[in-house]
Image (spheres, coloured by chain):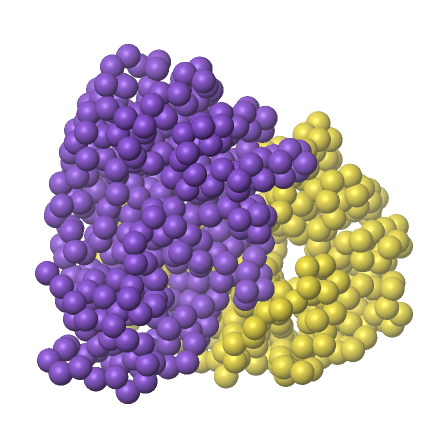
Chain colours: A yellow, B purple
Amino acid sequence: MPHSLLLRDVRPMAGARADILIRDGRIEAIGTGLSAAGVDAVDGAGAIAIPGLVEAHTHLDKTLLGMPWYRNEVGPRLIDKIDNERAAKKTLGIDPHRQSMRQAVLSVSKGSTHIRSHVDVDTESGVGSIEGVMATRDALRGVIDIELVAFPQSGMLIRPGTVELMDRALALGAEVVGGIDPAGMDRDPKGHVDTVFELAERHGKPVDIHVHELGELGGFSMELIIERTRALGMQGKVTVSHAFCLGMDDKAYVARLVEQLAEAGVHIMTTGSASRPVPVVKQLRDAGVVVCAGTDGMRDTWGPYGNADMLERAMLVGLRNNLRRDDEVEIALDVCTHGGAKVMALEGYGLEVGCHGDLVLVGGETLTDAVVTRAPRHLVVKGGRVVARDGVALVEAP
Amino acid sequence: MPHSLLLRDVRPMAGARADILIRDGRIEAIGTGLSAAGVDAVDGAGAIAIPGLVEAHTHLDKTLLGMPWYRNEVGPRLIDKIDNERAAKKTLGIDPHRQSMRQAVLSVSKGSTHIRSHVDVDTESGVGSIEGVMATRDALRGVIDIELVAFPQSGMLIRPGTVELMDRALALGAEVVGGIDPAGMDRDPKGHVDTVFELAERHGKPVDIHVHELGELGGFSMELIIERTRALGMQGKVTVSHAFCLGMDDKAYVARLVEQLAEAGVHIMTTGSASRPVPVVKQLRDAGVVVCAGTDGMRDTWGPYGNADMLERAMLVGLRNNLRRDDEVEIALDVCTHGGAKVMALEGYGLEVGCHGDLVLVGGETLTDAVVTRAPRHLVVKGGRVVARDGVALVEAP
């Protein structure tokens, strides 16, 4: 159902005032004094226009949004959080479809037009979470694009039966093969990474692996991932999420790793975590590595933070990377827009003629102003259709 | 001018619903079914009541709030930023009174009832900034309490004439003696710290020194400060702001420093900086060190970030310190309320009978919810007087 829309008096990327004409879902023209008979027109009143924000890493299936307050008393270890969550899914009744609808609709209201969501696959809930989020993906078609990563949160080789479930999730339609801490979780880095890439080969799908492992251990996992990316010719189709090891002290080793990532076309996802070592965004980009960002889990059993606002995420990435100059803060915004689009290989993404009519009108004087104030989202447009206005999505969540 | 106010149906610290009666500026009673003839009553509708937020470290004189957008193209070194700012004060016309009014009124709207502001003293602007912020302090009396730290931003011993200006600023009424990077800025750690403490002794005023110096260099500066605090019997009257060195790798040395800070009653201020090493809040508090927090500079020539929201600061401190459990996030809120009150030695601070009627009604289900969502400020009350409502201050800034 293609939509047409004329946005009058907006400032594309905070530049000169112009009109943007979207016809049948695509940007047909950007210029001054545009008109189009029979096309709805909106007065942008000089608002900044940016392409749709890209939420490139979250966990739609596990938010507690809209549920009674969860008092977090979870232990400090990673395994405490994973075990607690697997149990809480049943005791709290975290319904993957309902909860993913709530978070996805919140994302719409904040100006995201695309989401890559890791979705749990494990031997307790099987592919139930995948099915729940796929139902959300279908329900919100035309409002926000959702891509699923089949994600073995509780480990793969250490929990027999999980590989088969991953296979099933991918056959059902999950678009990306996930993985997690090859050494730290499965205790078998070679086995874990081999399994992930075998699944990717069999299904012809890209890879996005969580690597929380620190220092040289994380570096080794990255090396294994890079080697397989090269061997299978999967350049541009593999992402490492978090990659905390790239924040390690041994800067010479990090530099060598970054060089290999660039050569192998392996992308990096960062949340700009304030409490962990993090990849240095400017170093990665300068080396030619694509960097995207995401909210990660929000208001879940892991922690209470997060609001699905990718403009706020740009601010947090900026703060974490000490990006102070305007041109630097604009890099953080680029990570949360074009960076995510490159990682998700989105066709026709951008604020150019011919691109999909996916964009956001935001307040603020400049792009940096919009990021640091997390300026109001006046209008969110998806394929030429207005999907949110003044911070409120025009679709409802259960 | 004492004010009286009856707040009906609020939840003090997110606990059971109660009324709070403020009479003649002080909390007279907290209980259910309170009434008071002739006293204005407000229906809190179950909102959470917390004591006024305490902004314990900012720079009111240098924000660019309300001025044309400043495109930041400043160099990467500390000295680049300091020199750039000293020049920009003239070229941009950063009026200390006007700008401090703007930021202080923003603080009021966000629920802060007390501010400690470092205010530049240097040989180019003399005590002009001090006078400007003092005018703001006077103009906003009864709306928000402002305490001034005479702050030698550009160095003290390396810029002859500055010590005399510091002396004059303190004689004029600045309440606290400031300092900055004894080694890194003045290149004479003993000389700098001696001068700061001589000024403190002469004027009978407390001390708050910026220490950005990293690792062992910062540790040495801290030791010099601790030694003088003990020698002069100034326990409880000295604060080190930032103290990035407490985030250093040598945890055994940090533990010894923390022990000495606790013994000497030296307080620590943190912004929860995402890009620098930071003091560990829980470690400090467990050792008995008082920790407060602040916004630091906001929207100034140093960088575009910041919004004077101390509830957001609690979130940032929580994120930086990986505080995930509810009891942990509540620590971050305590740092931004009682922590600041202890550092500023505020008499009668708190949400108890007998305390000043300085409080905020905020949204949210729980304290953690209020912090992580930076819940709306429904009402800000200072000495029983309503000074902001629904996020809007009832006083105006120029």
Q: Looking at the image, which residue is at 19% across and 25% down?
A: B168
Number of marks = 0
Q: Position of residue B343 (x, y in %)?
A: 38, 46
Q: Nearer the viewer, residue A369 or B346?
A: B346
Query: Can I make out residue B327 in this image?
Result: yes
Is residue A371 found left or right of B92 in the rendered image?
A: right
Q: Quadrant of residue A9?
A: bottom left
Res. B361 visible in picture: no
Residue A172 vertical placement versus A112 (above, below): below
Quarter assignment of residue A386: bottom left
- Return the residue nearer the eye: A3 or B217: B217
Closer to us: B20 or B49 = B20
In the rendered image, residue B118, in percent from the top left (x then y), is placed at 30, 36
> Of residues B169 and A103, which is closer to you in this image?
B169
Q: Residue furthest bottom?
A: B33
A218 sits to left or right of B144: right
The residue lying at 21 percent from left, 62 percent from top is B383
Q: Taking A203 as reference, is B104 left or right?
A: left
Task: Tell me the residue at 57%/47% (across/down).
Answer: B287
> Looking at the picture, how far across and down is residue A96, in whole percent?
63, 78
- Place of residue A75 in the rendered image (x, y in percent of width and height, measured from the top left): 68, 64
Q: Residue at x 67, y 45 (%)?
A: A244
B397 to A204, vertically: above or below: above
Q: Is residue A198 placed above or below B249 in the rendered structure?
A: below
